[in-house]
Image (spheres, rainbow, N blue to C red):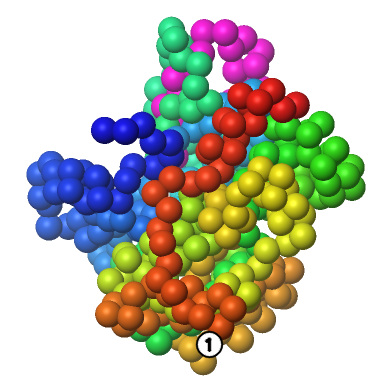
Amino acid sequence: MEDKLGKIDHHLFTDIVRTQCGHQRNEVRVGPRFGVDVSVTDLPGGMAMAITSDPLSLIPSLGLEESAWLSVHLMANDMATTGFAPMYGQFVLNLPPTLSKQDFKTYWNYIHKFCADIGIAITGGHTGFIEGQNSTIAGGGTLFTIAPRQQVLTSQNARPGDTILVTKQAALSATSILAMSFPQTVKNYIGAEAYQKACAMFYDTSSLRDALTAVGQHTRYNDVTAMHDVTEGGLLGAIYELASASDSGALIFSDHLPVGKVQQNVCALFSIDPRHCVGAGSMIITCKKDSASLIIERLKKENIPCCVVGEIKEKENGVKLVENGLAKNLTYLREDPYWEAFFGALRKGWK
């Protein structure tokens, strides 16, 4: 098998992982599925438990605070797609032996803080130092939440006729991490002011508030049909995944996709398309057609930009991208171009 970076290939996941998932339990309503951010298990009393897992980040070029932010919020973004905030968390830390006690204390303090800020109780896990551990992945975490069964959303709930919305802008995480990792190069290319704007995007990479605002935090609305977190593959990859998860097609208008000037410039420097690269912080939302303006207005009141980018179609229509007036089949990229851009810049010695 050829080497690949990032998430497992769609077909490899479908052929191997999804077909071998241990003992079958009837209460598992949503198990492993391509394009679905959480699993859902039915509980007594009309409740359900949603669970999501992700790697934990420890990236020296970013810093301990920023790494802890990614560790907590990338998982929380997945849970946000249910329409509920995470409640409990388990963390497994496999740390490099070179990490000092003080640095571990600092890192864990930020993990604690960011969990406390959004209501996550840390309930356990495992912590150890591992010889040969030099990866930017420091283990893994799992978040849980319990909510009324009928109110838990998953990305497989989208239906033909639904409008597709996108919050914020494309490539927020790719742009900010590349800028923070290669500051001299980015400053020289786009200027100091644009560089600062790129770095400031880093703390826009949480989409929890987007999701909770869309479904209603005080009054619960029923006009959101599905949500999907934008990670590897960017806005286009996320919409493709949501359509696949819901056994549907989609029509996407490229000129409606929100791509800011800073993202365009940083991505151009690294020769990547901002529509296709990792974009944590944006949320894909599908909704009933006549509710799109209402949801956009709810988000606007919380200063969260949101726009219409397309429509869910019947499966036989496929996933189409309209560019320059022509609708073409959208190709799902098996590897996010961000990874090659990041490691390519390292190999070139960019600073």
Magenta highlight range: 89-109
Q: Residue at x 54, y 31 (%)?
A: 57
Quadrant including the C terminus: top right
Q: Nearer the viewer, residue 232 or 73?
A: 232
- Residue 319: where, in percent of width, then height? 39, 72
Quadrant including the N terminus: top left
Report the residue marked by disc 1: 291
Residue 205 higher or lower than 260, as above or below: above
Q: Residue at x 61, y 70 (%)?
A: 257
Q: Is residue 216 visible?
A: no
Q: Residue at x 49, y 33 (%)?
A: 56
Residue 251 higher or lower than 281, as above or below: below
Residue 33 higher or lower than 317, as above or below: above
Per the image, is 101 magenta?
yes
- Residue 49: where, in percent of width, then height? 32, 55
Q: Is residue 130 visible?
A: yes
- Residue 346: where, in percent of width, then height? 63, 26
Dividing the picture into quadrants, the one containing residue 176 is top right
Q: Residue at x 60, y 18 (%)?
A: 104
Q: State the SS at label 1.
A: helix
Per the image, is 135 magenta?
no
Identity, as a three-letter code, of the amino acid under mark 1: Ser
Q: Nearer the viewer, residue 137 or 251?
A: 251
Q: Nearer the viewer, residue 315 or 41?
A: 315
Q: Residues within 10 Å of mark 1 (few under 14, many from 20)?
A: some
* For residue 273, side relative to residue 148 (left or right): right
* For residue 332, side relative to residue 347 (left or right): left
- Residue 182: where, in percent of width, then height? 73, 32
